[in-house]
Amino acid sequence: MIAQHYLHAPLYTKSVFVFDWDGTILDSMPQKSLNFVRAFKSTIPESLQSELVDSMKGHYLQLSGHPRKYIFDEILNLLNLEPKEITFDHFNAEFEVLNKQNLIHAKLFVDALDLLRALIDEGRQIFISSSVPPKELVDLVGAILPDSIRQNISSILGSLDDFSKGKGHLQRIINETGATRDQILVVGDDVADYELSLEAGVDCILVDRGRILQGRKICTVNNLYQLRDNLKNEIQGTR
């Protein structure tokens, strides 16, 4: 069961569902973390690579969910690297190439597909909100997500410096749908998704497939079948 006391409003009242992409719908994080390390290595002096490479992946996974530029700057700081010598544009271009080459082969989570189909059947509005840059995200979603689901996604929102996941995306969704914050639910997979939603005053449920978030005061499910079934049961209970 979902811990309802962590939500501002009951699940059945949610009319707008906002999904993270990587790690929530697409099983991409193992490959994406490798891509990140390869892209980051390409931007730093070779003399530093061997001592830093082991820590890069862990830092990336901990920061995952935040906008890409934020992650890049935070890791530079954590590794005590000088930003003037390492450009984000160089890193981002390499990272994007690797993602386009490799993530096209990543698998969609079956539980995510089932939940999306259930929400479509219930007439709920669906958005995708990601820290991935807009064009990269739209291209990947278009190539991977089945047309029957893709056609029912209201908007695919990627992140730029002045418009990013969290407050920016959620305000756009509020403006577009007319929904209140209590009528919106963010579905993500990491703590950053929860923190960005909390900052925006919107409920969030995290799918914790690895059961690493247990014990935190965060609303979680072990898989998205649980979220689908809880929603179905609540709807039936109101009819």
Image: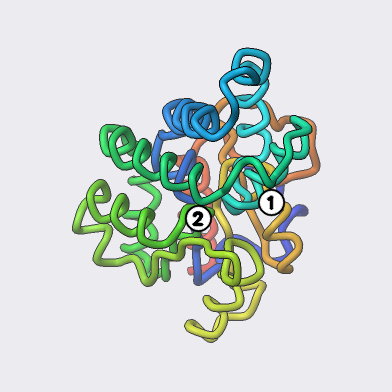
Residue 58 position (above or below residue 222): above
**Based on the displayed image, in which of its 4 quarters is residue 181 positioned?**
bottom right
Q: How many marks?
A: 2
Rate crowding at label 1 as few (under 14), some (14 to 19) or many (20 or more) other CA atoms within 10 Å: many
Kind of residue sitting beneath label 2: Ser
Secondary structure beneath label 1: helix
Percent position of residue 122, x then y: 37, 66
Kind of residue sitting beneath label 1: Tyr
Kindly tell me whether residue 7 is visible in this rendering. Answer: yes
Percent position of residue 69, x then y: 60, 52
Residue 84 position (above or below residue 14): above
Percent position of residue 205, x then y: 62, 50
The residue pinned by badge 2 equals 130
Residue 62 position (above or below residue 124): above
Instruction: Report the residue at 57% width, 80% height from top.
Output: 174
Percent position of residue 54, x then y: 63, 16
Q: Find the distance from the CA under tag 2 to the CA under tag 1.
A: 13 Å
**Based on the displayed image, in which of its 4 quarters is residue 106 positioned?**
top left
Secondary structure beneath label 2: loop
Q: Is residue 172 left or right of residue 203?
A: left
Instruction: Report the residue at 70% width, 38% height from top.
Output: 76
Which of the labelled discs sits on residue 114, or is there none? none
Q: Nearer the viewer, residue 107 or 44?
A: 44
The residue pinned by badge 1 equals 194
Rate crowding at label 2 as few (under 14), some (14 to 19) or many (20 or more) other CA atoms within 10 Å: many
- Quadrant the N terminus occupies: top right
